[in-house]
Image (cartoon, helix red, strand yellow):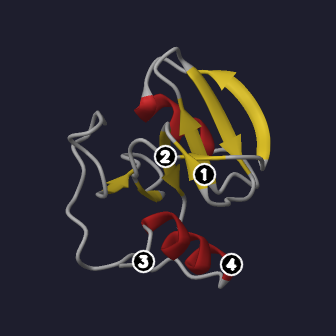
């Protein structure tokens, strides 16, 4: 099985906005592990993200901000030029990413 992070990275590098058709829609407000491996669509700009819980992409940090929750972190990424993924930690730190690599435990959501 292909890791969701690698799958979305390949689509981003190809310049495609296609999403695997077998992913369920996420709830509006994201929580892990309930919303692991689902498709989240921003309610205003229709940016789409594939969520992956308990994974952190190391490096590629574009900017670090404080966010009230995982959904807020994704919203900022969807409005930030060059942001292709995020890592959100329960302490409110949101790491906007300009690239993704294999990683370790945390909340991650690649941007297709």
Residue 74 placement, left or right of 81:
left
Q: Position of residue 13 (x, y in %)?
A: 68, 78
Q: Are marks 1 and 2 in contact (CB under 8 Å)?
A: yes
Would you name the residue on which mark 1 appears? 103
How far apart marks 1 and 2 lie (CA) works out to: 6 Å
Q: Nearer the viewer, mark 2 or mark 4?
A: 2
Tell me the element at label 2. loop
Give the mark, 1 or 3, whose residue is nearer the N terminus: 3
User: Which residue lies under the disc numbered 4?
Assistant: 13
Mark 1 or mark 4: which is in front? 1
Mark 4 to mark 3 CA distance (whole Å): 16 Å
Q: Which mark is residue 2?
A: 3
The tag earlier along the polypeptide, 1 or 4, is 4
Cα distance between the residues tagged 1 and 3: 14 Å
Can you give x and y, in whole percent of width and height, for residue 65 in the image?
68, 23
Q: Earlier in the sequence, mark 4 or mark 3?
A: 3
What residue is shown with label 2? 55
């Amino acid at each position: 099985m292909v890791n969701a992070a690698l799958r979305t990275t390949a689509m981003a590098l190809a310049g495609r906005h296609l999403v695997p058709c077998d992913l369920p829609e996420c709830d509006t407000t994201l929580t892990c592990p309930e919303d692991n491996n689902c498709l989240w669509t921003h309610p205003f700009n229709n940016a789409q993200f594939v969520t992956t819980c308990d994974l952190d992409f190391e490096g590629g940090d574009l900017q670090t901000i404080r966010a009230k929750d995982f959904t807020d972190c994704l919203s900022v990424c969807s409005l930030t030029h060059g942001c292709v993924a995020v890592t959100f930690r329960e302490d409110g730190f949101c790491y906007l990413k300009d690239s993704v690599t294999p990683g370790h435990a945390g909340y991650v959501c690649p941007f297709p």
